[in-house]
Amino acid sequence: MHTRPTSYRIDRTVEDEIAYLRYQIRRFSELRGIYNCRIPPSLVDQVETGRFFTEDELRNAVVSDAEPGSSMDELRSEWASQAQELFEAFFARMKRHPTYFLKVHVTKYGPGGSYHPTGLPGHPGRFISIKDPKIARSHWTFNQTIVHETIELLIHDKVGERKTPHDEKEAIVDKFCSCNELQAVYGPYPKQSSFAGSLPDDWQSYITWLPGEAPSWN
């Protein structure tokens, strides 16, 4: 088994929020019917017009957003409390070694989480984003969301090669996240009911495991 877990840098900066917010505004009309995509209150009435926002407008909107967020230190501690166990329960079993470093952008905006294999303009390098738990009010824990988005990132290439539909991809990731070994660490994993019937027959082939190290499911 691999023994070196991924190092996650959990943070939120104004510059990263600006870059991520611009990305979410471009996708607002596409996502709002599926997810609860939060944007700064000062921009709510203007986003639907499709207008372009300047860097200063986005910065002012982010800085003036008074919605209370989580403590980064508390979120880092929450992840650290299970990081090694989660790595050994799942990622260390994989034949393809997970990345050694991954940035986690904790955001007040967008859906519950997203992954970015090549980064975004103004937000370079691969990263995953997770909506601040105090704002998202998700059924998942913070650690479950990190695992979910990390798995999405790791199967991204195969999803692209196979042209896997969105619903099937989400069902695959939910299946992996609900293996016995992960749930023994982070508790019951709530699957997304809207994707429950979309699991393809070849779901297990999206990850290759070391000999004898595949996780199990009830």
Image: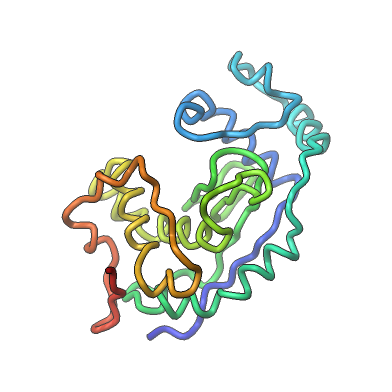
In the rendered image, which quarter contains the C terminus?
bottom left
* Residue for point 59% across, 29% down: 25
Toward the top, the furthest residue is 49
Where does residue 131 sit, x and y in percent of width and height?
Answer: 61, 47
Query: Which quadrant would residue 197 be assigned to in this image?
Result: top left
Where does residue 163 sit, x and y in percent of width and height?
Answer: 25, 44
Q: Nearer the viewer, residue 177 or 150?
A: 177
Q: Is residue 175 left or right of residue 55?
A: left
* Residue for point 56% across, 74% down: 83
Q: Is residue 198 left or right of residue 124?
A: left
| Above or below, 97 relative to 149 | below
Where does residue 62 sit, x and y in percent of width and height?
Answer: 76, 37
Q: Is residue 166 left or right of residue 119?
A: left
| Above or below, 112 relative to 145 | above
Q: Nearer the viewer, residue 209 or 118?
A: 209
Q: Is residue 46 left or right of residue 144?
A: right
* Residue for point 69% across, 43% down: 17
Where does residue 193 sit, x and y in percent of width and height?
Answer: 36, 44
Query: Which quadrant would residue 101 be assigned to in this image?
Result: bottom right
